[in-house]
Image (cartoon, coloured by chain):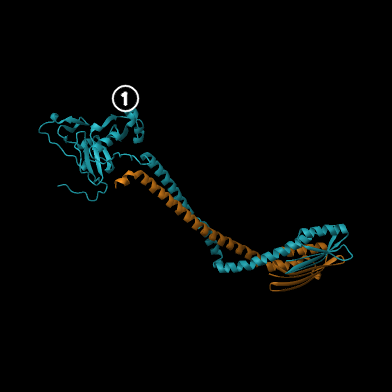
Amino acid sequence: MERPNILNFMENTKELILVYQEMRRIDTMPSKAINIMLTPQFYTLIREELPVKYAYQAKRIAASLFDGLLEDAQNHHYFVIKEEDSWLFIAYNPEMIRSFLESKGIDVETISKIYFAEQSLSSFVSPVLLGDTDALVNLNGTMTVVPQTLLDADKRTMQIHKSLTPKNGVSFEARGNALLGTNDTYTLAAILILFASIYVIEASRYGNGSAIQEEEMRVILEDYPALESSYTRKSILSKYRKIDKEERTKRNVIKSLSSMIFKGATLTRLSINDTKFQATFECSNAKVSKRLKALAKKENFVAVGLKNSNNLNIEGQL
Amino acid sequence: MNSIKAYKNELIVAVAFLLLLMAFFYKQGLVATQNVASSDASNSLNELKETIALKKVWANKQTTKKVDKLRSLVSPSSVKWKRTGKKLTASFSNLSPIELNRVVVKVMNLAVSIQKLDVIKSGTSYTMELKCKW
Protein backbone atom coordinates (compact mmCIF):
# COMPACT_ATOMS: atom_id res chain seq x y z
CA MET A 1 0.00 0.00 0.00
CA GLU A 2 1.33 3.39 -0.98
CA ARG A 3 2.22 5.51 2.00
CA PRO A 4 1.39 9.19 1.59
CA ASN A 5 4.39 11.41 2.13
CA ILE A 6 2.69 14.06 4.24
CA LEU A 7 5.78 16.06 5.14
CA ASN A 8 7.13 16.37 1.63
CA PHE A 9 6.06 19.92 0.85
CA MET A 10 8.28 20.03 -2.24
CA GLU A 11 6.35 17.29 -3.97
CA ASN A 12 4.58 18.47 -7.10
CA THR A 13 0.88 18.04 -6.41
CA LYS A 14 -0.39 19.43 -9.71
CA GLU A 15 -2.11 17.15 -12.16
CA LEU A 16 0.12 15.98 -15.02
CA ILE A 17 -1.50 15.72 -18.46
CA LEU A 18 0.23 13.96 -21.35
CA VAL A 19 -0.11 15.93 -24.57
CA TYR A 20 0.03 14.13 -27.91
CA GLN A 21 -1.13 14.86 -31.44
CA GLU A 22 -4.17 12.59 -31.52
CA MET A 23 -5.47 13.54 -28.10
CA ARG A 24 -9.15 14.33 -27.74
CA ARG A 25 -10.39 17.83 -27.03
CA ILE A 26 -10.77 18.50 -23.31
CA ASP A 27 -14.13 20.07 -22.62
CA THR A 28 -13.89 20.48 -18.86
CA MET A 29 -10.55 21.88 -17.78
CA PRO A 30 -9.59 21.56 -14.12
CA SER A 31 -9.91 24.86 -12.29
CA LYS A 32 -6.53 24.37 -10.61
CA ALA A 33 -3.18 24.82 -12.31
CA ILE A 34 -1.88 21.79 -14.19
CA ASN A 35 1.40 20.53 -15.59
CA ILE A 36 1.74 19.05 -19.04
CA MET A 37 4.16 16.52 -20.45
CA LEU A 38 4.89 16.66 -24.17
CA THR A 39 5.48 13.60 -26.31
CA PRO A 40 8.34 13.66 -28.86
CA GLN A 41 5.78 14.82 -31.46
CA PHE A 42 6.32 18.35 -30.09
CA TYR A 43 10.06 18.53 -29.72
CA THR A 44 13.36 17.56 -31.27
CA LEU A 45 16.17 16.29 -29.12
CA ILE A 46 19.91 15.79 -29.29
CA ARG A 47 22.17 14.06 -26.77
CA GLU A 48 25.70 15.32 -26.86
CA GLU A 49 28.80 14.91 -24.74
CA LEU A 50 30.19 18.37 -24.34
CA PRO A 51 33.09 19.72 -22.30
CA VAL A 52 30.92 22.32 -20.56
CA LYS A 53 30.19 22.52 -16.88
CA TYR A 54 27.10 24.66 -16.54
CA ALA A 55 23.65 24.59 -18.15
CA TYR A 56 23.82 28.23 -19.22
CA GLN A 57 26.99 27.46 -21.18
CA ALA A 58 25.30 24.51 -22.85
CA LYS A 59 22.23 26.60 -23.61
CA ARG A 60 24.38 29.13 -25.45
CA ILE A 61 25.46 26.55 -28.01
CA ALA A 62 22.05 24.83 -28.24
CA ALA A 63 20.96 26.77 -31.34
CA SER A 64 24.11 25.82 -33.26
CA LEU A 65 23.59 22.13 -32.43
CA PHE A 66 20.18 22.17 -34.07
CA ASP A 67 21.46 24.10 -37.08
CA GLY A 68 19.82 22.63 -40.20
CA LEU A 69 17.57 20.27 -38.20
CA LEU A 70 14.73 22.69 -37.57
CA GLU A 71 12.55 24.28 -40.22
CA ASP A 72 11.76 27.49 -38.38
CA ALA A 73 14.68 27.67 -35.95
CA GLN A 74 14.03 31.27 -34.99
CA ASN A 75 10.69 30.27 -33.39
CA HIS A 76 12.25 27.54 -31.27
CA HIS A 77 13.29 27.68 -27.70
CA TYR A 78 15.80 25.36 -26.12
CA PHE A 79 15.73 23.34 -22.94
CA VAL A 80 19.00 21.87 -21.69
CA ILE A 81 19.53 19.38 -18.90
CA LYS A 82 22.58 17.51 -17.68
CA GLU A 83 22.43 13.74 -17.75
CA GLU A 84 25.02 11.36 -16.39
CA ASP A 85 27.64 11.63 -19.14
CA SER A 86 26.01 13.91 -21.65
CA TRP A 87 23.78 16.92 -22.13
CA LEU A 88 20.20 16.59 -23.31
CA PHE A 89 19.17 19.38 -25.69
CA ILE A 90 15.49 19.79 -26.50
CA ALA A 91 14.21 22.25 -29.10
CA TYR A 92 10.53 23.16 -28.97
CA ASN A 93 8.27 25.73 -30.54
CA PRO A 94 6.20 27.39 -27.79
CA GLU A 95 3.82 29.11 -30.19
CA MET A 96 3.05 25.90 -32.03
CA ILE A 97 2.50 24.10 -28.70
CA ARG A 98 0.33 26.95 -27.45
CA SER A 99 -1.85 26.84 -30.60
CA PHE A 100 -2.18 23.09 -30.33
CA LEU A 101 -3.18 23.21 -26.67
CA GLU A 102 -5.74 25.93 -27.35
CA SER A 103 -7.16 23.85 -30.21
CA LYS A 104 -7.61 21.02 -27.69
CA GLY A 105 -9.46 23.26 -25.24
CA ILE A 106 -6.59 23.61 -22.79
CA ASP A 107 -6.31 27.10 -21.38
CA VAL A 108 -2.58 27.83 -21.45
CA GLU A 109 -2.96 30.22 -18.54
CA THR A 110 -3.72 27.27 -16.28
CA ILE A 111 -0.49 25.52 -17.27
CA SER A 112 2.10 25.80 -14.60
CA LYS A 113 5.00 23.88 -16.16
CA ILE A 114 5.73 22.09 -19.38
CA TYR A 115 7.80 18.91 -19.21
CA PHE A 116 9.17 16.66 -21.90
CA ALA A 117 8.63 12.89 -21.88
CA GLU A 118 12.38 12.42 -22.39
CA GLN A 119 13.00 13.86 -18.92
CA SER A 120 11.20 10.93 -17.28
CA LEU A 121 12.86 8.33 -19.47
CA SER A 122 13.64 5.91 -16.65
CA SER A 123 10.08 6.10 -15.30
CA PHE A 124 8.55 4.81 -18.52
CA VAL A 125 8.95 1.12 -17.75
CA SER A 126 5.93 0.21 -19.90
CA PRO A 127 4.34 1.77 -22.98
CA VAL A 128 1.76 4.52 -22.56
CA LEU A 129 -1.12 4.33 -24.98
CA LEU A 130 -1.75 7.53 -26.95
CA GLY A 131 -5.36 7.23 -28.13
CA ASP A 132 -6.29 4.29 -30.32
CA THR A 133 -3.34 4.06 -32.68
CA ASP A 134 -0.09 5.18 -31.10
CA ALA A 135 1.93 4.48 -27.99
CA LEU A 136 4.77 6.21 -26.19
CA VAL A 137 7.62 3.85 -25.45
CA ASN A 138 11.15 3.97 -24.20
CA LEU A 139 12.93 2.72 -27.29
CA ASN A 140 16.67 2.11 -26.79
CA GLY A 141 16.92 4.94 -24.30
CA THR A 142 14.81 7.49 -26.20
CA MET A 143 11.13 8.20 -25.78
CA THR A 144 9.48 7.42 -29.09
CA VAL A 145 5.94 7.38 -30.47
CA VAL A 146 5.25 4.10 -32.23
CA PRO A 147 2.09 2.52 -33.67
CA GLN A 148 0.33 0.33 -31.15
CA THR A 149 0.49 -2.50 -33.67
CA LEU A 150 4.20 -2.82 -32.96
CA LEU A 151 3.61 -3.51 -29.28
CA ASP A 152 3.51 -7.03 -27.91
CA ALA A 153 -0.10 -8.02 -27.41
CA ASP A 154 0.51 -9.20 -23.86
CA LYS A 155 2.72 -6.24 -22.90
CA ARG A 156 1.31 -4.33 -19.96
CA THR A 157 0.77 -0.60 -20.41
CA MET A 158 1.02 2.18 -17.86
CA GLN A 159 -0.90 5.36 -17.15
CA ILE A 160 0.59 8.81 -16.82
CA HIS A 161 0.64 10.01 -13.20
CA LYS A 162 1.89 13.08 -11.41
CA SER A 163 4.62 10.98 -9.81
CA LEU A 164 6.27 11.07 -13.27
CA THR A 165 6.67 14.86 -12.99
CA PRO A 166 10.35 15.68 -13.52
CA LYS A 167 12.23 18.21 -11.42
CA ASN A 168 12.73 20.95 -14.00
CA GLY A 169 10.40 22.24 -16.64
CA VAL A 170 9.69 25.27 -18.76
CA SER A 171 6.85 27.77 -18.70
CA PHE A 172 4.97 29.67 -21.32
CA GLU A 173 6.05 33.24 -21.50
CA ALA A 174 3.31 35.79 -20.98
CA ARG A 175 1.69 36.82 -24.21
CA GLY A 176 -0.63 39.46 -25.54
CA ASN A 177 -0.92 42.50 -23.31
CA ALA A 178 1.99 41.44 -21.05
CA LEU A 179 4.63 44.14 -21.06
CA LEU A 180 7.62 42.13 -19.94
CA GLY A 181 9.29 38.97 -21.16
CA THR A 182 10.46 36.36 -18.67
CA ASN A 183 14.15 37.19 -19.07
CA ASP A 184 13.49 40.92 -18.76
CA THR A 185 11.37 40.26 -15.68
CA TYR A 186 14.02 38.28 -13.87
CA THR A 187 16.77 40.72 -14.85
CA LEU A 188 14.75 43.71 -13.71
CA ALA A 189 13.61 42.01 -10.51
CA ALA A 190 17.21 40.97 -9.76
CA ILE A 191 18.42 44.57 -10.24
CA LEU A 192 15.66 45.93 -8.01
CA ILE A 193 16.35 43.35 -5.30
CA LEU A 194 20.07 44.08 -5.56
CA PHE A 195 19.41 47.75 -4.91
CA ALA A 196 17.05 46.86 -2.08
CA SER A 197 19.81 44.72 -0.53
CA ILE A 198 22.29 47.58 -0.88
CA TYR A 199 19.87 49.88 0.96
CA VAL A 200 19.40 47.31 3.74
CA ILE A 201 23.17 46.77 4.09
CA GLU A 202 23.73 50.52 4.12
CA ALA A 203 21.01 50.91 6.73
CA SER A 204 22.64 48.29 8.95
CA ARG A 205 25.93 50.22 8.73
CA TYR A 206 24.16 53.38 9.87
CA GLY A 207 22.85 51.43 12.83
CA ASN A 208 26.32 51.56 14.44
CA GLY A 209 26.84 55.25 13.75
CA SER A 210 26.93 56.60 17.29
CA ALA A 211 28.38 53.46 18.93
CA ILE A 212 31.99 54.72 18.65
CA GLN A 213 31.11 58.06 20.24
CA GLU A 214 29.15 56.38 23.01
CA GLU A 215 32.08 54.07 23.74
CA GLU A 216 34.49 57.02 23.84
CA MET A 217 32.12 58.83 26.19
CA ARG A 218 31.92 55.78 28.45
CA VAL A 219 35.73 55.57 28.67
CA ILE A 220 36.04 59.28 29.55
CA LEU A 221 33.28 59.09 32.14
CA GLU A 222 35.09 56.24 33.86
CA ASP A 223 37.83 58.77 34.70
CA TYR A 224 35.39 61.59 35.48
CA PRO A 225 32.38 60.00 37.20
CA ALA A 226 31.35 63.39 38.63
CA LEU A 227 30.53 64.56 35.12
CA GLU A 228 28.13 61.74 34.40
CA SER A 229 25.10 63.93 34.86
CA SER A 230 24.41 66.18 31.90
CA TYR A 231 22.98 68.85 34.27
CA THR A 232 26.23 68.93 36.22
CA ARG A 233 28.21 69.12 32.98
CA LYS A 234 26.10 71.97 31.66
CA SER A 235 26.37 73.88 34.91
CA ILE A 236 30.16 73.51 35.10
CA LEU A 237 30.52 74.25 31.41
CA SER A 238 28.49 77.47 31.53
CA LYS A 239 30.50 78.67 34.57
CA TYR A 240 33.91 78.08 33.00
CA ARG A 241 32.85 79.15 29.50
CA LYS A 242 31.95 82.56 30.94
CA ILE A 243 35.25 82.86 32.80
CA ASP A 244 37.19 81.67 29.78
CA LYS A 245 35.51 84.17 27.46
CA GLU A 246 35.95 87.15 29.81
CA GLU A 247 39.56 86.39 30.66
CA ARG A 248 40.52 85.79 27.05
CA THR A 249 39.03 89.20 26.17
CA LYS A 250 41.04 90.91 28.94
CA ARG A 251 44.24 89.28 27.79
CA ASN A 252 43.57 90.15 24.16
CA VAL A 253 43.05 93.77 25.15
CA ILE A 254 46.38 93.81 27.05
CA LYS A 255 48.05 92.17 24.05
CA SER A 256 46.57 94.75 21.67
CA LEU A 257 47.59 97.65 23.89
CA SER A 258 51.11 96.23 24.18
CA SER A 259 51.38 96.18 20.39
CA MET A 260 50.58 99.92 20.39
CA ILE A 261 53.78 100.71 22.30
CA PHE A 262 56.39 101.76 19.77
CA LYS A 263 59.02 104.48 19.35
CA GLY A 264 57.40 107.75 20.35
CA ALA A 265 54.37 106.14 22.03
CA THR A 266 54.69 105.38 25.74
CA LEU A 267 52.07 103.82 27.98
CA THR A 268 51.68 106.03 31.04
CA ARG A 269 48.58 104.54 32.57
CA LEU A 270 46.56 101.34 32.23
CA SER A 271 43.49 100.33 34.12
CA ILE A 272 41.50 97.14 33.61
CA ASN A 273 38.61 95.76 35.62
CA ASP A 274 35.77 93.34 34.96
CA THR A 275 33.78 95.72 32.77
CA LYS A 276 36.09 98.18 31.02
CA PHE A 277 39.65 99.24 30.31
CA GLN A 278 41.40 102.56 29.88
CA ALA A 279 44.95 103.32 28.73
CA THR A 280 46.79 106.61 28.37
CA PHE A 281 49.56 106.94 25.84
CA GLU A 282 52.11 109.74 25.68
CA CYS A 283 52.91 110.54 22.06
CA SER A 284 56.04 112.40 21.01
CA ASN A 285 54.36 114.16 18.07
CA ALA A 286 51.13 114.43 16.08
CA LYS A 287 52.27 111.82 13.56
CA VAL A 288 52.71 109.20 16.31
CA SER A 289 49.37 110.21 17.79
CA LYS A 290 47.68 109.78 14.41
CA ARG A 291 49.25 106.37 13.90
CA LEU A 292 48.18 105.30 17.38
CA LYS A 293 44.63 106.47 16.69
CA ALA A 294 44.56 104.39 13.51
CA LEU A 295 45.78 101.32 15.42
CA ALA A 296 43.14 101.87 18.13
CA LYS A 297 40.43 102.21 15.50
CA LYS A 298 41.57 98.97 13.91
CA GLU A 299 41.06 97.23 17.25
CA ASN A 300 37.63 98.88 17.65
CA PHE A 301 38.83 100.88 20.66
CA VAL A 302 37.76 104.44 21.36
CA ALA A 303 40.72 106.86 21.11
CA VAL A 304 40.34 110.38 22.44
CA GLY A 305 43.06 113.04 22.18
CA LEU A 306 43.89 114.89 25.39
CA LYS A 307 43.69 118.69 25.36
CA ASN A 308 46.81 120.71 24.55
CA SER A 309 48.94 117.64 23.86
CA ASN A 310 49.46 114.77 21.46
CA ASN A 311 48.59 112.30 24.20
CA LEU A 312 45.76 109.80 23.67
CA ASN A 313 43.26 108.13 25.91
CA ILE A 314 42.23 104.73 24.62
CA GLU A 315 39.30 102.96 26.21
CA GLY A 316 36.67 100.36 25.66
CA GLN A 317 34.15 97.97 27.22
CA LEU A 318 34.89 94.38 28.05
CA MET B 1 -6.40 33.40 -11.12
CA ASN B 2 -5.82 33.36 -14.85
CA SER B 3 -5.49 37.13 -15.06
CA ILE B 4 -2.93 37.03 -12.24
CA LYS B 5 -0.96 34.44 -14.17
CA ALA B 6 -1.19 36.57 -17.33
CA TYR B 7 0.47 39.43 -15.49
CA LYS B 8 2.87 37.25 -13.51
CA ASN B 9 5.95 39.05 -14.83
CA GLU B 10 4.59 42.49 -14.05
CA LEU B 11 3.61 41.22 -10.62
CA ILE B 12 7.14 39.96 -9.94
CA VAL B 13 8.62 43.31 -10.97
CA ALA B 14 6.03 45.17 -8.89
CA VAL B 15 6.85 43.09 -5.80
CA ALA B 16 10.58 43.62 -6.37
CA PHE B 17 9.96 47.35 -6.78
CA LEU B 18 7.91 47.36 -3.60
CA LEU B 19 10.79 45.66 -1.79
CA LEU B 20 13.13 48.30 -3.16
CA LEU B 21 10.86 51.08 -1.92
CA MET B 22 10.53 49.47 1.51
CA ALA B 23 14.30 49.05 1.76
CA PHE B 24 14.82 52.65 0.66
CA PHE B 25 12.41 54.10 3.20
CA TYR B 26 13.76 51.77 5.89
CA LYS B 27 17.26 53.10 5.19
CA GLN B 28 16.07 56.72 5.06
CA GLY B 29 14.22 56.30 8.35
CA LEU B 30 17.23 54.73 9.99
CA VAL B 31 19.56 57.40 8.63
CA ALA B 32 17.32 60.17 9.97
CA THR B 33 17.08 58.52 13.40
CA GLN B 34 20.79 57.80 13.48
CA ASN B 35 21.67 61.33 12.42
CA VAL B 36 19.77 62.69 15.41
CA ALA B 37 21.28 60.07 17.76
CA SER B 38 24.74 60.59 16.31
CA SER B 39 24.43 64.36 16.57
CA ASP B 40 23.27 64.07 20.21
CA ALA B 41 26.11 61.69 21.05
CA SER B 42 28.61 63.95 19.30
CA ASN B 43 27.32 67.04 21.15
CA SER B 44 27.46 65.27 24.50
CA LEU B 45 30.99 64.07 23.81
CA ASN B 46 32.18 67.52 22.73
CA GLU B 47 30.47 69.06 25.75
CA LEU B 48 32.18 66.57 28.05
CA LYS B 49 35.59 67.14 26.47
CA GLU B 50 35.18 70.92 26.67
CA THR B 51 34.09 70.72 30.33
CA ILE B 52 37.14 68.64 31.22
CA ALA B 53 39.47 70.94 29.25
CA LEU B 54 38.08 74.14 30.79
CA LYS B 55 38.10 72.63 34.25
CA LYS B 56 41.74 71.64 33.82
CA VAL B 57 42.61 75.24 32.96
CA TRP B 58 40.42 77.28 35.32
CA ALA B 59 40.27 74.94 38.31
CA ASN B 60 43.88 73.83 38.24
CA LYS B 61 45.25 72.96 41.68
CA GLN B 62 48.71 74.13 40.61
CA THR B 63 47.53 77.72 40.01
CA THR B 64 48.22 78.84 43.62
CA LYS B 65 51.82 77.69 43.30
CA LYS B 66 52.18 79.46 39.98
CA VAL B 67 50.69 82.66 41.37
CA ASP B 68 53.16 82.61 44.27
CA LYS B 69 55.99 82.60 41.75
CA LEU B 70 54.96 86.13 40.74
CA ARG B 71 56.70 87.41 43.89
CA SER B 72 60.03 86.05 42.81
CA LEU B 73 60.00 87.95 39.53
CA VAL B 74 60.96 91.24 41.19
CA SER B 75 62.92 92.20 44.27
CA PRO B 76 60.98 91.58 47.50
CA SER B 77 61.20 95.27 48.47
CA SER B 78 59.12 96.20 45.43
CA VAL B 79 56.21 93.89 46.30
CA LYS B 80 53.36 94.14 48.75
CA TRP B 81 51.70 90.75 48.80
CA LYS B 82 48.42 89.67 50.30
CA ARG B 83 46.99 86.33 49.40
CA THR B 84 43.95 84.87 51.12
CA GLY B 85 43.03 81.41 49.88
CA LYS B 86 42.44 81.84 46.19
CA LYS B 87 42.41 85.62 46.15
CA LEU B 88 45.39 87.87 45.66
CA THR B 89 45.98 91.57 46.10
CA ALA B 90 49.50 92.57 45.07
CA SER B 91 51.17 95.89 44.65
CA PHE B 92 54.40 96.26 42.67
CA SER B 93 56.40 99.49 42.76
CA ASN B 94 59.56 100.84 41.15
CA LEU B 95 59.31 98.45 38.26
CA SER B 96 61.52 99.01 35.27
CA PRO B 97 59.77 98.65 31.88
CA ILE B 98 61.42 95.22 31.51
CA GLU B 99 60.24 94.08 34.96
CA LEU B 100 56.75 95.37 34.27
CA ASN B 101 56.67 93.50 30.99
CA ARG B 102 57.85 90.31 32.71
CA VAL B 103 55.17 90.54 35.41
CA VAL B 104 52.36 91.39 32.97
CA VAL B 105 53.29 88.53 30.65
CA LYS B 106 53.35 86.14 33.62
CA VAL B 107 49.95 87.35 34.83
CA MET B 108 48.50 86.94 31.34
CA ASN B 109 49.67 83.34 31.27
CA LEU B 110 48.14 82.51 34.64
CA ALA B 111 44.69 80.95 34.71
CA VAL B 112 43.33 83.58 37.08
CA SER B 113 40.42 85.93 36.83
CA ILE B 114 41.84 89.48 36.73
CA GLN B 115 39.55 91.68 38.75
CA LYS B 116 41.74 94.76 38.66
CA LEU B 117 44.99 95.63 36.92
CA ASP B 118 46.31 99.17 37.26
CA VAL B 119 49.62 100.32 35.82
CA ILE B 120 50.88 103.86 36.38
CA LYS B 121 54.10 105.38 35.09
CA SER B 122 55.85 107.74 37.44
CA GLY B 123 59.08 109.08 36.07
CA THR B 124 60.99 106.21 34.56
CA SER B 125 59.45 103.50 36.71
CA TYR B 126 56.08 101.89 36.96
CA THR B 127 53.79 100.86 39.73
CA MET B 128 51.31 98.07 39.27
CA GLU B 129 48.37 96.90 41.30
CA LEU B 130 46.85 93.50 40.74
CA LYS B 131 43.73 91.97 42.17
CA CYS B 132 42.81 88.52 41.02
CA LYS B 133 41.13 85.26 42.06
CA TRP B 134 41.12 81.69 40.79
Question: Is A89 located above or below residue A264 in the figure?
Answer: above
Image point 89% across, 64% down: which residue? A309
Element type at mark 1: loop
Front residue of A183/A26: it is A26
In x, y percent, where is residue A12? 25, 45
Image point 10% across, 32% down: which residue? A153
> Horizontal placement of A214 versus B104: left or right?
left
> Horizontal placement of B17 versus A310: left or right?
left
Image point 33% across, 26% down: which residue? A67
Residue that carries the numbered disc 1 in the rendered image:
A68
Question: Is A52 located above or below residue A108 in the figure?
Answer: above
In x, y percent, where is residue B50? 61, 62
Inspect this view and state whether residue B60 appears. no
**Which chain is cyan in the picture?**
A
Q: Amino acid at mark 1?
A: Gly
In x, y percent, where is residue A276? 75, 68
Task: Indicate the chain on which mark 1 is placed.
Answer: A
In x, y percent, where is residue B112? 70, 67
Residue sitting farthest toward the right: A308
Question: Is B21 located above or below residue B127 in the figure?
Answer: above
Front residue of A313/B53: it is A313
**Which chain is orange in the picture?**
B
- Name the quarter where the C terminus of chain A is drawn: bottom right
